[in-house]
């Protein structure tokens, strides 16, 4: 287990995956209840198929990283994107180029970060991102919150240990705040100019294809939409072979252009 210490009470667990040093890193950002372990073998498979090195890490409050240090606000994804992520990249990757691969909250965080136009960012894969809040988003989170209270999501304890209750309620209660209903990052999208692949399951219980449409229409770089039939909120797990093939093709266009 590798640990990056940002402060005495701010330690992040991470994993590096070996790959071709001449290719960009693939930096994986997990979902709102996820962590490194919950990606399972997907990062290793994608890195192996592309020959790219990889970086997977647990954000503050998740997995094997330190617990949350304060109550979340409606700006929590901006904080992860603009404070935590830049530190990780600076320390662990230095001047190496990279492509972000974000899922759900991790995808929204990736979009926020990409809008800053960091010079070493070469592309972005957004899977099940939210750029605004929809009614189905709230319905889905209410259902998940009720399931957690009923003890039906106890499997999360395997991944988050004694932080499980804190991180689950930080996620659900922040999204269910009345003020969060107006959360929206569409204003940032025109600042994103790198190649982008936006993926979402047609049956995603947390959002509609309007999310992908907004991302593809408003970003200014080459952008591609992929809606996957018979698939919910986690395409990389539910339709892994299709998602791997599409991501490999997308990443290849970037790595070939760098030669």
Image (cartoon, helix red, strand yellow):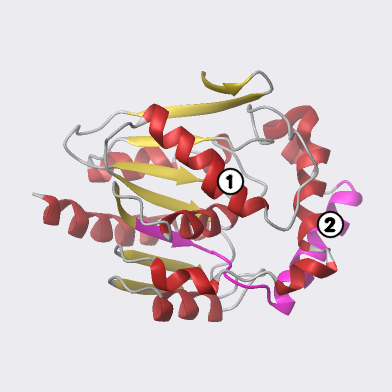
Q: In the image, which residues are magenta?
A: 124-151
- Residue 255 lies in the magenta stretch: no
* Res. 233 image quadrant: bottom right
Question: Which residue is pictured at 71% across the width and 70% down the height?
Answer: 137
Q: Position of residue 132 (x, y in %)?
A: 62, 73
What is the total number of numbered labels drawn onto the structure image? 2
Nearer to me, 34 or 218: 218
- Residue at 42% across / 68% down in the picture? 198
Question: Vertical placement of 186 versus 78: above or below?
Answer: below
Residue shown at 54% from the left, 52% from the top: 106
Q: Residue at x 45, y 28 (%)?
A: 15
**Is 21 located above or below residue 136 in the figure?**
above
Q: x, y (%) of residue 195?
A: 29, 64
* In contact (CB < 8 Å): disc 2 and disc 1: no
From the viewer's side, name the closer residue of 59 and 50.
Answer: 59
Q: Earlier in the sequence, mark 2 or mark 1?
A: 1
| Disc 1: which residue | 80
Q: Which residue is denoted by mark 2 in the rendering?
A: 145
């Amino acid at each position: 287990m590798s640990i990056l210490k940002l402060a005495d009470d701010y330690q992040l667990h991470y994993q590096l995956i070996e790959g071709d040093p001449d290719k960009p890193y693939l930096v994986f950002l997990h979902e709102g209840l996820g962590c490194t372990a919950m990606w399972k073998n997907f990062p290793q498979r994608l890195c192996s198929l592309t020959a790219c090195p990889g970086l997977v890490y647990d954000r503050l409050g998740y997995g094997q990283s330190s617990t949350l240090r304060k109550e979340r606000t409606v700006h929590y994804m901006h904080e992860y994107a603009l404070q935590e992520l830049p530190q990780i990249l600076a320390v662990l990757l230095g001047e190496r180029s990279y492509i972000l691969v974000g899922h759900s909250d991790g995808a929204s965080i990736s979009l926020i970060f990409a809008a800053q136009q960091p010079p070493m960012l070469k592309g972005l894969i957004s899977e099940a991102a939210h750029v605004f809040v929809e009614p189905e988003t709230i319905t889905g989170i209410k259902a998940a919150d009720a399931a957690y209270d009923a003890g039906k999501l106890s499997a999360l304890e395997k991944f988050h240990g004694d932080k499980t209750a804190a991180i689950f309620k930080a996620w659900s209660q922040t999204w269910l705040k009345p003020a969060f209903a107006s959360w929206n990052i569409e204003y940032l999208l025109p600042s994103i100019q790198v190649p982008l692949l936006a993926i979402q399951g047609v049956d995603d219980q947390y959002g509609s294809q309007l999310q992908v449409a907004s991302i593809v229409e408003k970003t200014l770089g080459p952008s591609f939409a992929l809606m996957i039939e018979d698939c919910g909120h986690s395409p990389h797990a539910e339709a892994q072979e299709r998602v791997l093939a599409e991501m490999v093709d997308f990443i290849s266009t970037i790595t070939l252009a760098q030669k």
